[in-house]
C-alpha cells in the first residue's frame, strides 16, 4: 500500500510542478511588466509579480525534481490562497464568463497541502539527503 501512496504522491508532485513551472514561464514570456501593472491595479505592489513568477518557475522545477517538496508546497499553497482570496473569490467558484473561478485553485491547494503533509520521496532528490532512509527509487 505504501508503494501506491508514494506513486500517487509522485504523480501529484510532478503535475503540480509542471503546472507552476508553466505559469511562471508564461508570466515572464507574456511580459512580466504587464503582470506587475495588473498586480498594482488590484492593490498588490508590482514588484511582487517578479517574486511570484520566480517562485512559480523555481518552485515548479524543484517539485519536478523532488527538491524541498514540503517547503515549496507550503509556499505555493500560500500564493494560491492569497490569489484565491484577493482575486478569484469575487468571481465565484466557476467564474463569471470573463475570468476563471477558483475551482482549479482549490484543487491545486489540495495537491500542495497533501505534499506539505506527506512529502514525496519516490524519484526525489530529497531522498538522497535523508540519513538512514532508502533512496526510494
Image: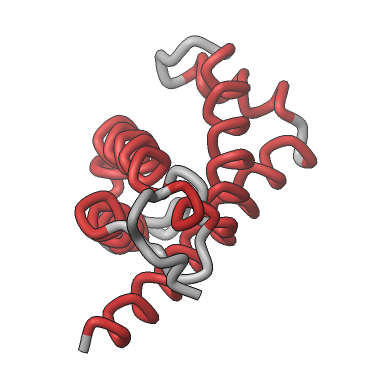
51 or 7, which is in the foreground? 7
Expressed as whole percent of the image width and height from the top left, the position of residue 111 reads: 31, 61
Q: Nearer the viewer, residue 70 or 102?
A: 70
> Where is residue 110 shown, x and y percent of the image?
25, 59
Q: Quick one: quadrant of the N terminus?
A: bottom left
Front-lying residue, 68 or 45:
68
> Which corner quadrant of the image does residue 103 belong to?
bottom left
Q: Is residue 106 visible?
A: yes
Where residue 90 sits: x, y (%)? 25, 41
Q: Residue at x 62, y 31 (%)?
A: 54
Q: Nearer the viewer, residue 109 or 38?
A: 109
Look at the image and tell me whether residue 95 can be seen. Answer: no
Residue 87 is drawn in which quadrant? top left
Q: Is residue 44 left or right of residue 59?
A: left
In the picture, measured across the screen, residue 105 lies left or right of residue 30, that is left
Vertically, is 36 above or below 94? Answer: above
**Hey, which quadrant is residue 88 in on the image?**
top left
Q: Tell how many labels.
A: 0
How does the figure colour the protein chain or chains?
A: secondary structure
Q: Residue at x 53, y 29 (%)?
A: 52
Q: Is residue 2 above or below residue 40?
A: below
Left or right of 105: which side holds 28?
A: right
- From the viewer's perspective, is residue 73 above or below residue 48? below
Residue 78, percent from left and from top? 30, 35
Determine the residue located farthest toward the front in the rendered image: 132
What residue is rendered at 51% in x and 14% in y? Answer: 40
Amino acid at each position: 500500500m505504501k508503494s501506491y501512496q508514494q506513486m500517487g504522491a509522485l504523480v501529484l508532485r510532478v503535475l503540480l510542478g509542471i503546472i507552476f513551472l508553466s505559469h511562471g514561464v508564461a508570466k515572464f514570456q507574456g511580459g512580466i511588466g504587464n503582470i506587475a501593472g495588473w498586480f498594482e491595479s488590484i492593490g498588490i505592489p508590482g514588484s511582487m509579480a517578479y517574486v511570484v513568477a520566480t517562485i512559480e518557475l523555481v518552485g515548479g522545477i524543484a517539485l519536478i525534481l523532488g527538491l524541498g517538496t514540503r517547503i515549496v508546497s507550503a509556499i505555493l499553497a500560500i500564493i494560491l490562497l492569497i490569489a484565491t482570496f484577493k482575486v478569484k473569490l469575487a468571481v465565484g467558484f466557476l467564474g463569471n464568463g470573463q475570468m476563471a473561478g477558483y475551482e482549479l485553485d482549490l484543487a491545486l491547494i489540495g495537491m500542495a497541502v497533501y505534499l506539505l503533509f506527506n512529502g514525496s520521496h519516490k524519484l526525489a532528490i530529497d531522498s538522497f539527503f535523508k540519513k538512514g532512509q532508502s533512496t526510494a527509487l
